[in-house]
């Protein structure tokens, strides 16, 4: 009842791998993927989810299985995140509490990084220790 963050309300999507032997050598094989999916899969938030702190944080998630690669790329690149990649990177960096990740997930074994996104040609030269300061954890600004 309250153990799943989202509930499936429309569609289905499965990918089943099947190992296929290609020779008499038992270690020589390949995998064949069998896909079965509807054009769209919809999940809605389970408001009775047992852990309120963890989510859900969005009302609905839709997976589009009917788009070509070009259509999917076009759809992504017409969103604000693609038109303004700098803002998207900054939002990601503000949204993540690096100190908490190190403390709670890594049990204190690590150092918080200055950035969570890969280095660019511009920032790679500045990645020397103590040169970059991490963005503070600020979920309100991230939104």
Image (tube, helix red, strand yellow):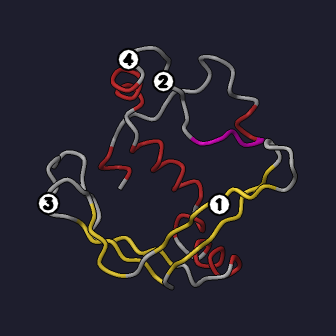
Q: Spatial distance from mark 1 to mark 4, Cα to Cα?
A: 38 Å
Task: Say which of marks 2 and 3 sits in front.
Answer: 3
**Dot placed on the residue nearer the N-terminal end, 1 or 4:** 1
Residue 86's spot in the image, x, y percent? 58, 54
Neighbor class of circle 4 (other Cα within 10 Å; few <14, some 14-19, many 20+) is: few
Q: Spatial distance from mark 2 to mark 1, Cα to Cα?
A: 41 Å
Find disc 4 in the rendering and name its residue.
107
Q: Nearer the viewer, residue 114 or 22?
A: 22
Q: Spatial distance from mark 1 to mark 3, Cα to Cα?
A: 33 Å
Task: Say which of marks 4 and 2 sits in front.
Answer: 4
Q: Nearer the viewer, residue 127 or 58?
A: 58
Which quarter shows the C terminus? bottom left
**Dot placed on the residue nearer the N-terminal end, 4 or 3:** 3
Mark number, residue 1: 3
Find disc 1 in the rendering and name its residue.
18
* Residue sitting at x 54%, y 50%: 89
- Residue 120 in magenta stretch: yes
Find disc 2 in the rendering and name its residue.
112
Q: Are marks 1 and 3 in contact (CB under 8 Å)?
A: no
Residue 130's spot in the image, x, y percent? 59, 17
Q: Spatial distance from mark 4 to mark 3, Cα to Cα?
A: 32 Å
Q: Is residue 74 above or below residue 87?
A: below
Which quadrant would residue 19 be assigned to in this image?
bottom right
Segment colored magenta: 117-121
The prevailing secondary structure element of the residues shown in magenta is: loop
Residue 24's spot in the image, x, y percent? 86, 49
């Amino acid at each position: 009842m309250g153990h799943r963050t989202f509930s499936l309300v429309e569609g289905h999507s499965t990918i089943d791998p099947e190992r296929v032997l290609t020779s008499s050598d038992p270690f020589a094989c390949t995998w064949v993927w069998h896909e079965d999916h509807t054009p769209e899969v919809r999940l809605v938030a389970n408001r009775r989810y047992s852990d309120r702190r963890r989510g859900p944080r969005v009302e609905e998630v839709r997976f589009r299985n009917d788009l070509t690669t070009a259509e999917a790329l076009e759809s992504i690149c017409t969103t604000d995140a693609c038109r303004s990649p700098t803002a998207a990177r900054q939002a990601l960096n503000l949204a993540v509490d690096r100190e908490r990740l190190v403390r709670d997930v890594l049990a204190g074994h690590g150092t918080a990084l200055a950035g969570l996104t890969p280095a660019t040609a511009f920032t790679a030269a500045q990645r020397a220790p103590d040169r970059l300061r991490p963005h503070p954890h600020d979920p309100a600004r991230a939104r």
